[in-house]
Amino acid sequence: MRVLRPFLTVFFIPALGFSQNSFSISGQLIDADTKQPVPFATVFLSNSAFGSTAKEDGTYFFDQIPPGKYELMVSEVGYQRFSHLVLFSDSSIKLNIALKQQITKLKEVIVTADRSDFNKWYPAFKKYFLGDMPNSNKCTILNPDVIDLQYDSEKKILKGYADLPIEIENKAIGYQIHYMLDEFEVVYTANSSSFKYYGIARFEELVPVNHAQMVIWRKRRDKAYYGSLSHFMKSLLQRELLKNEFGIFKPSKDGDWHKITEDSLFTKSKRNQINYKGRMGIEFYGQPEQSRVSGVYHSYQISTVRLEEDSITIYDNGYF
């Protein structure tokens, strides 16, 4: 499990599957100023395939949501993006939402005869955005025209922007991904590079050509989920790290790493709250490492994560 690898093709596995105890969410979208309904806005749970489009009267509804905590998002042209954390544990949720109008500041536009700079840096954008894993080769950005790339030659920094969602067709696992890019940056140094990006993803299932393709997609989705951060968090919450082939390690003062148990992380009063701050080593033995780490290949995956808060609460769907 490589925590910092690009997320779109491997790490973002939307929350699918149905629970015996599933929930729904409904409500109405209105304009915060005029109090009139906002029709046809997109309402969804971030990084999942759960969502819908609001009707003409601004009402929305979707269901079959497994228990857990999610980030509810509302996106519509002309309005500020809305986000709100929702917890499904005991009952379904009704949430009316007032959307604020977006005040757009016009950016300076430089008109050129071609997109030579864009064409020069677009391969680098795809490399870092989609990743270099096997699934990446089966991903296609459908609307590259919404992406703006700017390279600062003095600071050697490549930045990416997109005012509209980037549409990615992932034929490896059978999803179309609508990705709202908030930040993208690659910093080049003499011998290496570092990158970061952040955004919100919404998933839609592609229609398979036949049953055989659907079976292949489901197997690939399972493989992509297996060893992911969500898989780790769920295994940690259920105290099933060993069963799911994970190991966790704590650094000591002498510089060595010592294996610990999941029970040692949790508070006695709350079964889903861990009290741990600092670095933690994670090993996943279920799959070999797929890229180089320190110049050598490993037969299993190794990650290091840093927990910045004194305590963390983990929910049933792996949200933390």
Image (cartoon, helix red, strand yellow):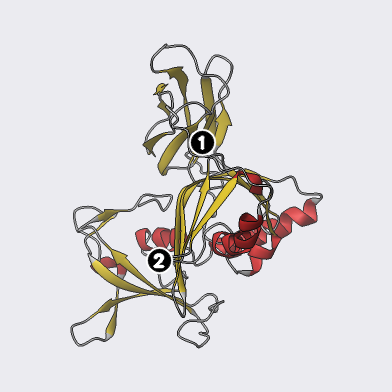
The residue drawn where x is 56% and y is 39% is: 164
The residue drawn where x is 51% and y is 48% is: 161
x and y, in percent, of residue 135 in the image: 65, 64
Crowding near the residue tagged with mark 1, few <14, some 14–19, many ≥20 C-alpha atoms within 10 Å:
many
Give, as a three-letter code, the residue at label 2.
Answer: Glu
State the SS at label 1: strand
x and y, in percent, of residue 121 in the image: 59, 61
Please tell me whether residue 261 is drawn above or below residue 34 in the rendered image.
Answer: below
Q: CA distance from mark 2 to mark 1?
A: 30 Å
x and y, in percent, of residue 27 in the image: 46, 22
The residue drawn where x is 42% and y is 42% is: 70
Nearer to us in this view, 35 or 86: 35
Please tell me whether residue 310 is drawn above or below residue 208 in the rendered image.
Answer: below
x and y, in percent, of residue 299 in the image: 52, 84
Please tell me whether residue 250 is drawn above or below residue 312 in the rendered image.
Answer: below
Residue 271 visible, this orientation: no
Answer with left or right where residue 25 lies relative to residue 177. left
The residue drawn where x is 22% and y is 56% is: 311
- The residue under label 1 is 44
- The residue under label 2 is 240
